[in-house]
Image (cartoon, helix red, strand yellow):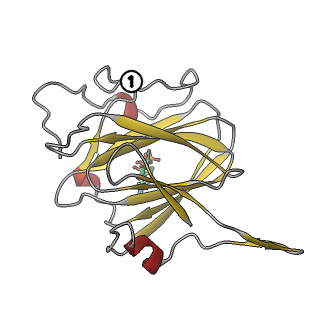
Amino acid sequence: MIFTPSELEGVFFISLQPVGDSRGWFSRTYCKNEFAAIGHDKEWVQINHSFTSQKGTIRGMHYQLPPFREIKMVRCIAGAVLDVVIDLRENSPTFLQHTQLELSAENRQMIYIPEGFAHGFQCLQDNCELIYHHSAFYTPGAEGGIMYNDPLTGIEWPLAPTEISDRDRSHPLLNKNFKGI
Ligand SMILES: Cc1cn([C@H]2C[C@H](O)[C@@H](COP(=O)(O)OP(=O)(O)O[C@H]3O[C@@H](C)C(=O)[C@@H](O)[C@H]3O)O2)c(=O)[nH]c1=O
């Protein structure tokens, strides 16, 4: 795997290094030793899979509050999405800045998201499937969310939004009292 640091400290874009032969290819998607080199020392406690049928759908922007903050690693195994993360780390020099990466079945890129970030994505095609690795258990009572179009984040989504869950339409807007997580 090739780990490329993003402009937000701790967020990495990861390229797989498939080894090909006449049958096809084989690739590692996680290795404790390789991830130790970027400072990852936690266990993945949940691996989740989601399917989204309609192009333009947005899911996000989600995070879990302390003490349930989590590291996530995301990859796309069908279709293509624009994946976006927002820095919510209190006192971070890049607080409320975001970065983004296209994840697709074709490019096989992954994104590594440390604790203290909100995460979301927009489907660039119909029938997108994502695989998530999580370092903390899903804890519904600890969930937080930011509106996908919050003016304080300035995310420019490439497509007009189509499907968005009721929950994701109801996140409160950020204000100057929000100090991060
Ligand atoms: C996230 C999650 C959801 N669920 C359930 C709750 C609900 O009935 C159904 C769908 O949940 P949601 O509406 O929260 O699904 P979704 O909006 O896709 O939530 C996901 O969004 C992206 C952006 C992320 O970063 C993920 O970590 C996760 O928060 O699945 C679980 O049972 N376990 C889980 O870990």
Q: Quadrant of residue 16?
A: bottom right
Q: Is residue 78 above or below residue 147?
A: below
Foreground residue, 172 or 181?
181
Specify the farthest residue to the bottom.
33
Where is mark 1, residue-wise?
Answer: 149
Could you tell me if residue 32 is visible in this image?
Answer: yes
Foreground residue, 32 or 121?
32
Q: Quadrant of residue 43?
A: bottom left
Q: Secondary structure at mark 1?
A: loop
Q: Is residue 16 above or below residue 88?
A: below
Image coordinates of residue 68 in percent, x first then y, are: 23, 60
In the image, taking residue 14 as reference, residue 139 lies left or right, namely left
Q: Residue visible at 25% across and 25% down?
A: 173
Specify the farthest residue to the left.
177
Looking at numbered disc 1 in the image, what kind of residue is underneath it?
Asn
Foreground residue, 38 or 111?
38
Q: Is residue 160 above or below residue 101?
A: above
Mark 1 neighbour class, 10 Å CA radius: few under 14, some 14 to 19, many 20 or more: some
